[in-house]
Image (tube, rainbow, N blue to C red):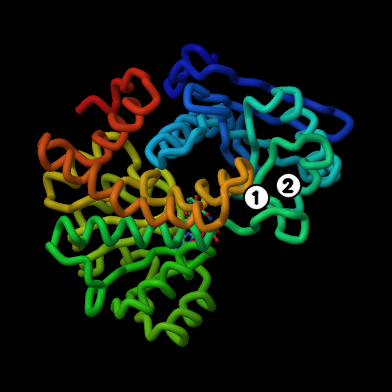
Amino acid sequence: MVFTHKDFDHHEQVVYCTDPAAGLRAIIAVHDTALGPALGGCRHWSYASEADALTDALRLSRGMSYKAALAGLPLGGGKSVILANPAADRGAMFEAFGRAVECLGGRYITAEDVGTTTGDMSAIRRHTRHVSGVAPDEGGRGDPSPATALGVLMGMLGALELRFDSDTLAGRRVAVQGLGSVGFELCRLLHERGARLIVADIAAERVERAVQAFGAVGVGVDVIHAVEADVFAPCALGAGLNDATLPQLACSIVAGAANNQLAHAGIGPQLKARGILYAPDYLINAGGLIKVAGEYLGFPIEEAERRVRAIRERTGEVLLRALREDADTAAVADTMACEAIGRAVPAASRR
Ligand code: NAD
């Protein structure tokens, strides 16, 4: 089931971990360690099936290899998923997971992801040092979201420069979908630079907060992707760019934080055909990874920030190469990541 799985991409290792006493069932996928140990968050989620959990681990770990490679980090890509178990004692479950991570001897480094907290990382750390994203009062660097938002801003500036020959945000209309940890911080950065914000979130109080703090205009979650804007910034869930939403887009640029924004590989060429410049998700949302990598590898905070700001230049390189090769930007990002790792480009990205 693993070797023939549609998302299996010659992953180096896929480890199933169980600890019945602690109620743990988890999968750790190590995609590639050519550039360094595989860093990637631990997702804690109620999966409909074991197969769904495996799919998530395989897809997300490959994405982490690409993200680290394009960010120029000496790291590979991995990801873990814990199948939610409401009957389990959370602390015991994450401690058991820490023991499983330790068994890999540093080939895999875990961190926070959807459904996990800095508290969970503390529980993991009782059994392994191969964990990052620990709370500041325990010697870590805390929440990676502000660094992610800064990186997205950098990617957006790179895309604006290419599209409009100017990276000024003053007066530009930016539609932000999702006002969570990253989306709200991104709004703050955009507001400081004079952008006009249109926002949506399923949580009405978050929209209200953005209206009050940034003079944003709130719209419904069903129309945010379709508003006329210079930039559409998806900062909610994945697959927001799909066969239904694509014809409705009314923006020049898509640049946001959400992972896996394209519902399938065919969306990249369609965005290009529509003249919409897409700043690839894992390229511009790498700020958080850079921050947790800095915590694990021990490079100074200033160096981490310099690397986050370098996302702008890297975005320019990817977008310019796509222009030169008349290719879609998502495929070019995949190709450049594979070149950096020394891997064959998967068939779905060869377009
Ligand atoms: P979050 O959970 O804090 O925020 C997500 C927000 O989106 C919430 O406010 C939620 O109410 C809203 N939302 C959900 N569905 C929506 C919909 N249909 N329309 C509008 N809003 C909706 O998450 P986050 O940490 O801000 O991350 C946002 C995205 O960026 C995620 O896709 C995440 O995987 C990705 N990402 C985050 C980081 C990070 O450092 N936090 C790093 C890389 C990528």
- SS category of the residue bearing label 1: loop
* Residue indicated by mark 1: 133
Which residue position is annotated with label 2? 121
Q: Is residue 45 visible?
A: no
The residue shown at (29%, 51%) is 313
Query: Which residue type does callout 2 highlight?
Result: Met
Answer yes or no: disc 1 within 8 Å of ligand 1.
Answer: no
Please tell me in which quadrant of the rendered image residue 264 appears: top left
Dot 1 or dot 2: first in sequence order is: 2
In the rendered view, would you say 34 is above or below 125?
A: above
Check the picture and name the quadrant holding the C terminus: top left
| Corner quadrant of residue 25 | top right
Dot label at residue 22: none
How many callouts does the rendering have? 2
Q: Is residue 88 left or right of residue 311?
A: right
Q: Nearer the viewer, residue 175 or 308?
A: 308
Q: Residue 309: image x %, image y %?
A: 39, 56
Labelled pair 1, 2 in contact (Cβ < 8 Å):
yes
Residue 262 found in image quarter = top left
Task: From the viewer's perspective, tell me whether residue 195 is left or right of residue 326.
Answer: right
